[in-house]
Amino acid sequence: MKIAGIIKSSLIDYPGKASTVIFLGGCNFRCGYCHNPEFLYMQQDKPEDGIDPRELMFFLRKRKRFLDGVCISGGEPTLSKELPQLVAEIKGLGMSVKLDTNGTNPDMLRGLIEKDLVDYVAMDIKGPVDKYQWIARNPVNLDDIRESVRILADAFRDKGFPFEFRTTVCRELLSVNDLERMIAEFPGAPAWYLQRFHNPGKILDNSGEYSAYSLVEMEDMGKRLCVSVR
Ligand code: SF4
């Protein structure tokens, strides 16, 4: 296993916590607006691809007094079979773990929650069912997505496990009506964040097809749909 990238200290990636963010390479989606295209094609088993987990653990041991937790992002982290072992080691340091996922691996998600190896999950919901594959630009097993939604909603109901759904909103991909349908189709989230699309200059599809709604439009959407905007 290799870690594709790292932000050593962040105050914005893990709600209420100072965290280190790590990015695991590889993803089974190809969203055109993806901000981390350089990670999507990385292979976990190639020694030249990224940082050795032992280096990460060395860093975390040194810095754990100043950090509350680790945010594991990607790419899609659950593609990595070694993820449970890595999070167990991080938890062994007494640190919290947040997982960012696209929800395509419900079995691993269930195992991580059942074994108390994650403390917070942010799951991407790409859009309503009939647009999911079009937005992800790769085959999507919607049963897996629905199963991940159920696992998170059940964990929240049964033991107050905290999680959020989040959706990147591009004008060309999602209308207000699409968002309304999406929220009805994937119930049970204690928090849902609509993220305004922005282009940092290196998204996966730089053809210029994507644009953002204005801030006012985003705020209006949030109010109408009773969800948060960021
Ligand atoms: S936005 Fe997320 S799910 Fe989509 S391609 Fe990028 S890493 Fe994968």
Image (spheres, rainbow, N blue to C red):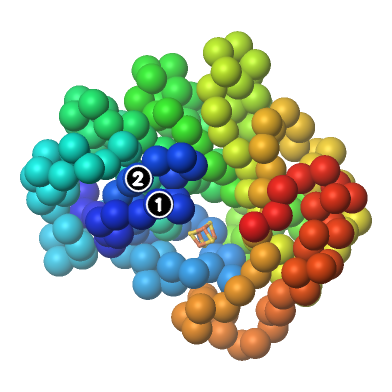
Query: Which label was assigned to residue 151?
Result: none
Residue at position x 44%, y 71% in the image: 37
Residue 174, can we see it?
Answer: no
Residue at position x 69%, y 43% in the image: 192
Gap in angstroms between the C-alphas marked 1 and 2: 5 Å
The secondary element bearing badge 2 is classed as strand
According to the image, label 2 marks what residue? Answer: 18
Queried on whether the Cβ of the residue with tag 2 lies below 8 angstroms from ligand 1, the answer reads: no
User: Where is the C terminus found, in terms of image quarters?
Assistant: bottom right
Task: Give the quarter of the image for residue 25.
Answer: bottom left
Callout 1–callout 2 Cβ contact below 8 Å? yes
The secondary element bearing badge 1 is classed as strand
According to the image, label 1 marks what residue? Answer: 11
> Along the horizontal axis of the image, is 18 left or right of 136?
left
Vertical position of residue 187 compared to residue 49: above or below: above
Residue 45 drawn at (x, y percent): 21, 54
Residue type at numbered disc 2: Ala
> Along the horizontal axis of the image, is 189 left or right of 77?
right
Vertical position of residue 19 compared to residue 94: above or below: below
